[in-house]
Amino acid sequence: MIPLLLLGHKRFQIKTPETPSLKDLYHTREDRSEEHVWEEYRTEEYRSFFSKLQTGVKTLIGYPDYLHSLALDSTKRFMLDRLEPDGTLYNYFGSTFFMIFALLSIGYSKKDPVIQKAVAGLKGMACSVEGHTHIQFTTPHVWNTSLISYALQEAGISSKDLTVKAANQYLLSRQHYMYGDWLIHNPNAIPGGWGFSDLNTMNPDVDDTTASLRALAKQLQAKPDNRDSWQRGVSFTISMQNDDGGFPAFERNNDHKWLHLLPIEGSKYLLTDPSTADLTGRTLEFLGNYTNMKKQEEVSKRAVDWLLEDQKRDGSWYGALGHLLSIRHMVCTDWHEGRRTIH
């Protein structure tokens, strides 16, 4: 969002002889659907709101130029402060791609070290598919490795096996030690989670953290030297529980309903991070089967209560992507009191 806001402000464009015509994407007044008309109406409402806001700012003598300069500087600093070791923004293709153009829009040279390193980072995400270059949205190394290591151990392969040991050593090397934006809504937690991609160092999520801990459980619980890594991972997971009892992905207590009103497709999951049944279910399974903490009962009870409230009338639950997902709960305690029993 930050690079896009800067690009929109600068109205930045780069055209080449190979730039395709996009005229066929424009709707004429005659072929606009009712949905498009309604979206235009909503957009005009927002434009009116921001126009009034802008007018108000301009009445503050001496402040508009200062605020404009401050905003540009803060936007640039936001991006540069979140660069990963490979030069990408958050280790994601989309955010890095738009960051490159955002920096160009404010005068950066194509040969600037920041841009060159970012481009190199994007090239590092490239792979070949049927002879064509494909750039992944991000690398899935941590997620894939944690699932495969766990599956091998569940299939009977020892945690001392060379393949499993190498996979788990990789996972340990990717545990986070840096504070990220999650600190804003979770100020009392310390780093200890895992992210999805290979070079993600500051943007952990609950799902990758519990997946990595499952894969590492036997190794970390068996060796006293590794207990700190285990405790940090578990503590970070528990700290992410929302006040409503469920679990989010990246940020706790970030479900501000007014953000759903912004004219952005999928804003509910792009701009907010509500509790979801799939994340809550998998976190419950992890806590129930792999931890033995005193606080676990309180955490699990609140999560179960949230899941019971979230169950749909047809008996199903919906996951973070809006798809119907089966939720497996293996909580050690059955909850009765006239309610459905959770296993």
Image: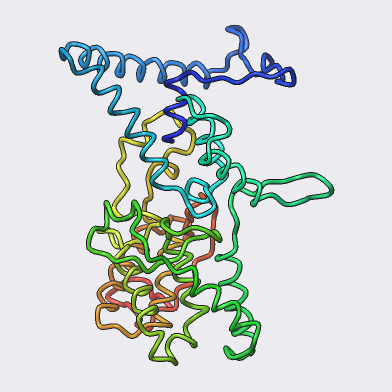
34 relative position to 129: left or right:
left
**Residue at position x 34%, y 36% in the image:** 259
**Residue at position x 28%, y 28% in the image:** 70
Question: In the displayed image of the protein, which residue is found farthest to the left?
Answer: 61
Residue 37: image location, x then y, percent: 50, 16
Q: How many marks?
A: 0
Residue 239: image location, x then y, percent: 29, 66
Q: Is residue 189 above or below residue 100?
A: below
**Residue at position x 48%, y 38% in the image:** 266
Which quarter of the figure has residue 155? Answer: bottom right
Quarter of the figure that contains the N terminus: top left
Of 75 and 107, nearer the camera is 107
Quarter of the figure that contains the C terminus: bottom left
24 relative position to 131: left or right:
left
56 relative position to 85: left or right:
left
Of 177 and 322, nearer the camera is 177
Q: Is residue 273 above or below residue 189?
A: above
Q: Is residue 200 above or below residue 97?
A: below
Question: In the displayed image of the protein, which residue is found farthest to the right?
Answer: 131
Residue 123: image location, x then y, percent: 66, 47
Which quarter of the figure has residue 234? Answer: bottom left
Q: Is residue 8 above or below residue 237?
A: above
Q: How does the figure colour the protein chain or chains?
A: rainbow
**Residue at position x 72%, y 20% in the image:** 20
Residue 229: image location, x then y, percent: 39, 78
Which quarter of the figure has residue 262? Answer: top left
